[in-house]
């Protein structure tokens, strides 16, 4: 499953470090090229020579490694190893980085971007999928700080595997055991496949909130943060897609590595989405677009008066419906529906009326401005309600379904038509 892939295995200083030996052996059997990176504490549990023998590559143990180290890697990875800065070269060469075991201390350092050793520095420098396999004692896993760190790592796109429950080295029993080899292996294989799952595809994401001017200093807008759209753009980028992010005002910075097209009003967004969406393979419209705009924006600031102020509003264009009307064959179109009640019926009605493949239904209290979201994926004949997840996790599930829809559409197009008699 991993033939031709480069997997960096990070080993931190926990008693479960010995189990990483079997992980390295399994990865090699699946065809992966493996490089092990150890913290100094990890070498107290397993000698580097063991990992060198199992992986067939030098073990990286510090920031001041030998520049003469030669790694046996696939060609696409080997050309990124220039022999200048070892941990940076390997960060660029990796198709997947898996840390097993990941101690509470290591996860805390990852959350805060600390990089005092080769493993944390590599994790900070790599754009590869990061699979984290926690292993620690029961109360360390239960501690509020550990739980918060896990949530932060998930929100940033890390894949958490385990821990499992059972007897622990301390003599206690409960959650804290390193996940099984089968679970870790499946996560690594899935991450490797996901990383290239959108290579060659052009993805356009609409995000953020539009702002409709009342006068030179005031606007009509909404509370959307743009976090969901940014998560979708980052997830598609990390799958190998060429991503264009058409974004109104956002409370977050646009992700690196995408083409950012800033817009202001709904009409600006309509123009930009039409321009970039026409060439896209996938369009995800996650922007919160103002339904109405002032019929006339004042040239000067509206002065405070003693009475009520009446505003005349006129409708904005329905951007999603326009994209649906102009979509080309094979293009997958995803919309978002922010509803109160009855949400599911309204989302399905919008799905049909706007000509989209997938409508993502959410409620204002479930994700507007926050770090998590609780959504329902609505299609013509099915609906899938997701639990509360980080916005990055929601983005990954949406993109998984987008790829399934693409495959279904392509199979339908390739199916031979019955000849008319």
Image (spheres, rainbow, N blue to C red):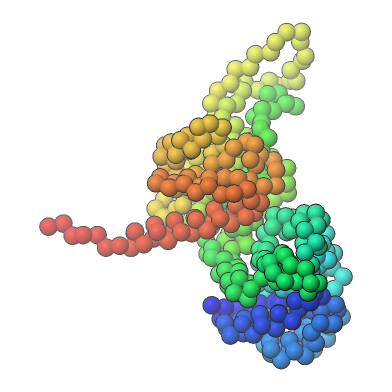
Q: Quadrant of residue 78?
A: bottom right
**Percent x, y of residue 220:** 66, 27
Picture quarter with the C terminus? bottom left
Q: Quadrant of residue 125?
A: bottom right
In the picture as drawn, the residue positioned furthest to the left comes out as 421
Q: Residue at x 39, y 53 (%)?
A: 329
Picture quarter with the N terminus? bottom right
Is residue 407 at all visible to an observer of this figure? yes
Q: Residue at x 81, y 79 (%)?
A: 42
**Percent x, y of residue 406:** 44, 58
Q: Quadrant of residue 207?
A: top right
Is residue 84 at all visible to an observer of this figure? no
Q: Nearer the viewer, residue 120 or 80?
A: 120
In the picture as drawn, the residue positioned furthest to the top comes out as 306
Up the image or down, 176 lies above or below 353; here it is below
**Percent x, y of residue 286:** 58, 44
Q: Residue at x 85, y 77 (%)?
A: 41
Q: Is residue 40 left or right of residue 264?
A: right
Q: Residue at x 70, y 54 (%)?
A: 155
**Percent x, y of residue 377:** 51, 47
Q: Nearer the viewer, residue 172 or 417?
A: 172
Up the image or down, 207 lies above or below 24; here it is above
How many numbered markers are drawn? 0
């Amino acid at each position: 499953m991993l033939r031709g892939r480069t997997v960096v295995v990070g080993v931190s200083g926990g008693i479960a470090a010995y189990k990483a030996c079997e992980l390295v052996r399994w990865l090699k059997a699946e065809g992966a090229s493996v490089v092990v990176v150890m913290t100094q504490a990890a070498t107290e549990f397993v000698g580097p020579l063991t990992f060198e023998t199992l992986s067939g590559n030098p073990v990286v143990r510090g920031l001041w490694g030998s520049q003469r180290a030669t790694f046996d890697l696939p060609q696409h990875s080997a050309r990124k190893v220039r022999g200048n800065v070892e941990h940076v070269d390997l960060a660029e060469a990796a198709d997947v980085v898996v840390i097993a075991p990941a101690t509470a201390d290591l996860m805390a350092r990852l959350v805060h971007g600390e990089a005092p050793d080769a493993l944390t520095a590599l994790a900070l420098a790599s754009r590869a999928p990061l699979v984290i396999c926690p292993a620690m004692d029961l109360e360390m896993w239960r501690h509020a700080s550990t739980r918060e760190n896990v949530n932060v790592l998930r929100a940033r796109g890390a894949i958490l595997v385990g821990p499992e429950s059972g007897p622990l080295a301390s003599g206690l029993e409960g959650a804290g055991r390193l996940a099984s080899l089968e679970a870790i292996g499946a996560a690594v294989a899935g991450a490797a496949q996901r990383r290239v799952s959108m290579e060659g595809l052009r993805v356009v994401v609409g995000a953020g909130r539009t702002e409709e001017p009342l006068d030179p200093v005031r606007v009509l807008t909404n509370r959307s943060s743009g976090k969901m759209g940014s998560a979708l753009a980052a997830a598609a980028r990390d799958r190998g897609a060429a991503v264009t992010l058409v974004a109104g005002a956002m409370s977050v910075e646009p992700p690196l590595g995408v083409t950012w097209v800033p817009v202001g009003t709904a009409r600006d967004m309509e123009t930009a989405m039409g321009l970039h969406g026409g060439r896209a393979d996938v369009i995800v419209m996650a922007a919160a677009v103002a339904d109405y705009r002032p019929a006339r924006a004042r040239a000067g600031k509206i002065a405070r008066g003693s009475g009520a102020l009446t505003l005349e509003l006129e409708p904005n264009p329905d951007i999603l419906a326009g994209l649906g009307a102009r979509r080309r064959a094979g293009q997958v179109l995803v919309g978002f529906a922010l509803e109160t009640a009855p949400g599911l019926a309204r989302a399905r009605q919008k799905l049909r009326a706007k000509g989209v493949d997938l409508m993502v239904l959410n409620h204002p209290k479930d994700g507007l401005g926050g770090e998590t979201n609780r959504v329902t994926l609505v299609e013509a004949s099915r609906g899938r309600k997701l639990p509360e997840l980080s916005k990055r996790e929601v983005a990954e599930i949406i993109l998984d379904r987008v790829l399934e829809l693409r495959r279904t559409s392509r199979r339908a197009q390739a199916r031979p038509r019955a000849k008319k008699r």
